[in-house]
Image: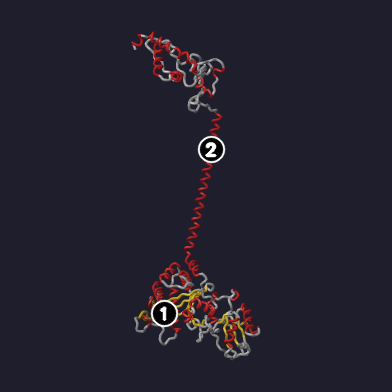
Amino acid sequence: MSERTGGQDDWSTGQYQQYQPYQEQAPQQQQPQQYDQYGQPVPSAYPQQGGYGYQEQQQYQQAYDPYPQQQYATAPQPVVTEPEPVPAAPAPAPPRPRAARPAATEAAPAKPEPPSEQVGGGRAGRSAAGKPGAGKSGAGAGKTSKDDYPTDEFTFVDEEAEESEDVIDWLKFAESRSEVRAERRRKLRNRLIGAGVVVALAAAGAGGYLWFTGDKQTAATAAGPRQVNVVHLRDLQGKVSSALLVNDSSGHKGTVLLLPDTLRLPGPGDPPVTTVGQAMDSIGPSATREGLTTVLGAPVAGTWRLDTPYLELLVAQLGGVRVDTNAEAHEGGKPDGKLLAAAGKNTLLNGKAAVAYATYQAPTENRDAQLARFGQVMDAVVRTMPTEFKDAKDDVHRMNAVLDPSLPEDALAGVLVQLSQQAKDGHFGTTALTVKPDGTLDDATAGKQVKDVLGGTVKSAASGDAPARVSIQDASGNDQAAAAAQVQVMNAGLTFIPGGSKTAPQAVSEIRYTDDARQAAAKSLALSLNLPETAAKKVTDAQNADLVVVLGKDYQAPKTQ
């Protein structure tokens, strides 16, 4: 430092003259003139100084700064002072014009207003203290505007009392509306909960009712319209025993109607005649049902083929049945076989004993005796069946029988449950259909029996378009008359029931009917037989067929071509 100060005058003067052109050319750079807020020009931040320290700083900057002009204009370096007293350099200009704060002695500070709740203090107080010239007299000296404040300063905003009250009222209003909404939501939630509880209780009640009554309804639904079904018991030798399981729901009774195997049925042959014992093998289960429907007048809906092994399994599944036996039951049906059940009242039969007793026929007995024992076993099976559909279905399923499509597993279980309920109510019995030795029905006895047993299951003539069932009795004395009349009946589109018998000769032919709905059919049949319409007569005695033709001597058989 001492070496540099030793040549101060010469170095500084030479340096000054060396850069004197630069000082003169500086205005040519068209540096922007800066002004304060009152329109007064701001003096240059680097006026020419005559001090040693200032010139040394200038020389230092010019020697090492590659851009002296820009350095001079944008970022001047601070003044370096020496021990020697030198004039103080003015403060450098800020990036944007900004007035210096006035001295406190120039004007009395304005009375600050109380600060508001906003951050930053009172606007008026900051305004008076922060603006230059605030101490000048006049109204303009005290005027302030929010635009005069830079964006980086906070100000206080005073609120009026009325505005505060409005805000409080608005908050109260908003709070009250929120409470109303909350109350509405609470009421809606309570209503939904109440509705859910009501629905749950209703569902529980309905479920309980269906659970309590579901078995009977399910059994009835499974059985459907199957009020009359036929069961065929077939032993290992091929012998068949048949019976009808009748559930007369309108008459509130159930019956096992035993069918003798000699009962004649219409078949597909010519002449169309077969028997119940032969029908399953000769015409099949479907044609057998149709033949029984024709003979009895009641629609037989299903077929239950019950082979003896399946009967044994069913009885074993039920835990045995109790029967009033009238003969001993031996294994294999042989007198020297193992004794399975003794004769007596309320005898408990297991599966094997039940099969042996149902198929037993003594050498001196006819088929009716064995049919009656089969009826006893079927009666005991029905009475032992459970009345709950689920249990009955399980028993039928465990029987593992190959069932006919007309009576599937669910339907068979439903039929047995309905019959078992009839037995529990005391409206169940077993009887045998009366048949003549030739296999035909006796109109005097069988007609009334069929009407009593089948009851409401018999189709009414007025309720359907089924053709009338016709039987023929020959009282003409001509052996060819019955055969000729049979052909005429079938040609008329009516259903012929075989088994007509000869009676005492009579002069006038008759066509008898019991139902007024068959009167038109009787008159039409009279014309087909070349008889007058007066031959149709209504009778009160029960008869099996819809129309019974009694051929008299006035009947003339058509001549063969």
**Looking at the rendering, which quadrant does residue 448 occupy?**
bottom right
Residue 421 shows in this picture? no
Q: Are marks 1 and 2 in contact (CB under 8 Å)?
A: no
- Of residues 299 and 54, the one drawn nearer to the viewer in this rendering: 54
Q: Position of residue 193 (x, y in %)?
A: 50, 50
Q: Secondary structure at mark 2?
A: helix
What number is the disc on residue 235? 1
Residue 173 shows in this picture? yes
**Looking at the rendering, which quadrant does residue 322 occupy?**
bottom left
Q: Position of residue 264 (x, y in %)?
A: 51, 83
Q: Residue at x 38, y 10 (%)?
A: 11
User: How far apart, in angstroms, are the residues tagged by discs 1 and 2?
Assistant: 92 Å
**Looking at the rendering, which quadrant does residue 524 occupy?**
bottom right
What number is the disc on residue 174? 2
- Of the two numbered discs 1 and 2 in the rendering, the one whose residue sits closer to the viewer: 1
- Of residues 31 and 408, the one drawn nearer to the viewer in this rendering: 31
Query: At label 2, which amino acid type do we have?
Result: Ala
Q: Is residue 7 left or right of residue 555?
A: left
| Mark 2: few/some/many CA within 10 Å (<14, 14-19, 20+) | few
Q: Position of residue 389 (x, y in %)?
A: 45, 68
**Number of on-image labels:** 2
Query: At label 1, which amino acid type do we have?
Result: Asp
Task: Give the position of the N terminus as an image quadrant.
Answer: top left
Q: Is residue 63 above or below residue 265?
A: above
> Sequence order check: which comes first, mark 1 or mark 2?
2
